[in-house]
Amino acid sequence: MDSRLNIISRISFAPISSIQSFNATVSGSVRLQVTEWKVIREVKGSAGFTISAGSGKSGDLVEVKFSIKLKDPLRQPGPVIVKIEFEDADPIIIGEKDLPVRFELDTSLTQKTLAFSHRSWHNPYKLIQ
């Protein structure tokens, strides 16, 4: 991702079982097909999104942290990949079959939140459309 401010326009996920093809390139892009993307209805302006890079015992380590407030309750979908679309940049994909994203869902009387922290050896993939 570049350093300018990117406004999130849509967040969706697909269960790992719905991935029909996932072809990643060495340049950090991915071409993929899933049976269906499920759109997350979030409270606009509530997203928290950071990507931090460092190194660990095994080499490079990239951690993506994400959280949003939900408009509607969401059932735990199990392991997924996440697509984040921006108003002014290419969509990105977080997770893959061998290293999926797992949501943390919290529902209280006043709010519903979804969060995840995903660690990998590479940055999120840029989606080839």
Image (spheres, helix red, strand yellow):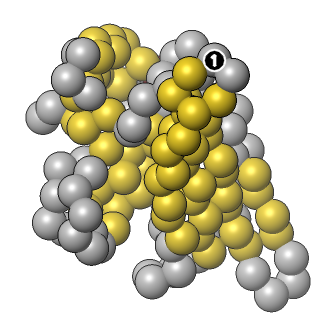
- Percent across and percent down for residue 40 are 49, 59
Q: Is residue 75 above or below residue 7?
A: above
| Residue drawn 75% across the image and 81% down it | 111
| Residue drawn 65% across the image and 47% down it | 117
| 70 relative to 53 in the view: left or right | right
The image quarter in which residue 73 lies: bottom right
| 46 relative to 26 in the view: left or right | right
* Kind of residue at disc 1: Ser
Q: 120 and 74: which one is in front?
A: 120
Q: 31 and 124: which one is in front?
A: 124
Q: Is residue 44 above or below residue 15?
A: below
| Residue drawn 12% across the image and 34% down it | 129
- Percent across and percent down for residue 123 are 39, 37
Q: 27 and 18: which one is in front?
A: 27
| 98 relative to 11 in the view: left or right | right
Residue 75 visible, this angle: no
Q: Which residue is mark 1?
A: 58
| Residue drawn 32% across the image and 34% down it | 125
- Percent across and percent down for residue 89 are 17, 58
- Percent across and percent down for residue 114 are 67, 61
SS of the residue at dot 1? loop
Q: How many marks?
A: 1
Q: Outermost residue, right direction?
A: 109
The image quarter in which residue 106 lies: bottom right
Q: Is residue 118 above or below residue 96?
A: below
For label 1, count other residues whose C-alpha is less than 10 Å away and answer few (under 14), some (14-19) or many (20+). Answer: few
Q: Is residue 80 above or below residue 117?
A: above
Residue 126 visible, this angle: yes
